[in-house]
Amino acid sequence: MKHRQRQPDKEILEHDRKRDIEVKVFELRDRLEDEEVDEEEIETQTEALRRKLTKESERGGGQVKKGLKMHQVHELAQAKIKQDDRFRSALGIGRDYEEGSHWKKDEERRMAKLEKLTESEK
């Protein structure tokens, strides 16, 4: 039985990414309002920050965050897939490798040998 890695929901990951951006934008807006900056300047700065963070996020390809919580199952699944890919690459194991395939081939060779012996005895 082959282990199936849990796949992250890309829509949830995208939603979380956008939410993180909006939280940072809101924090900037809140700070600027406390400093009594005029509304036009606030809009300019928050929009610039939003564009910058969006561009960084898209360029970064969803970097793995450290210290994920247990309830962040989709982020954890994505991090695990990336970790497994790095490990598989380091060991030189292909993506199509099936767990236990070495033993299966060994068993097939043994059965073929046994069949030849039984045929030669007849």
Image (cartoon, rainbow, N blue to C red):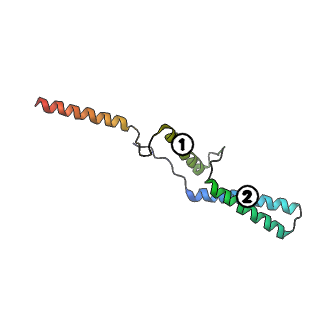
Mark 1 Cα shell of 10 Å, populated few (<14), some (14-19), many (≥20):
few
Q: Which mark is nearer the camera, 1 or 2?
A: 1
**Image: 100 above or below 78:** above
Residue type at mark 1?
A: Arg
When asked about the image quadrant of residue 50, the answer is bottom right
How far from the left and from the top, in percent, is residue 108? Answer: 28, 36
Q: Could you say which disc has been placed on residue 23 in the image?
A: 2
Quadrant of the image containing the C terminus: top left
Q: Which residue is mark 1?
A: 86
Q: Looking at the image, is 26 positioned above or below residue 67? A: below
Q: Residue furthest bottom?
A: 40
- Residue type at mark 2 is Val
Residue 2: x and y in percent read: 41, 43
Q: Is residue 112 left or right of residue 106?
A: left
Q: How many marks on residues? A: 2
Residue 16 shows in the view:
no
The furthest residue to the right? 36
Query: Which is nearer the N-term, disc 1 or disc 2?
Result: 2
Apparent side of residue 107 relative to residue 56 in the rendered image (left or right): left
Residue at the location (55% across, 48% down)?
77
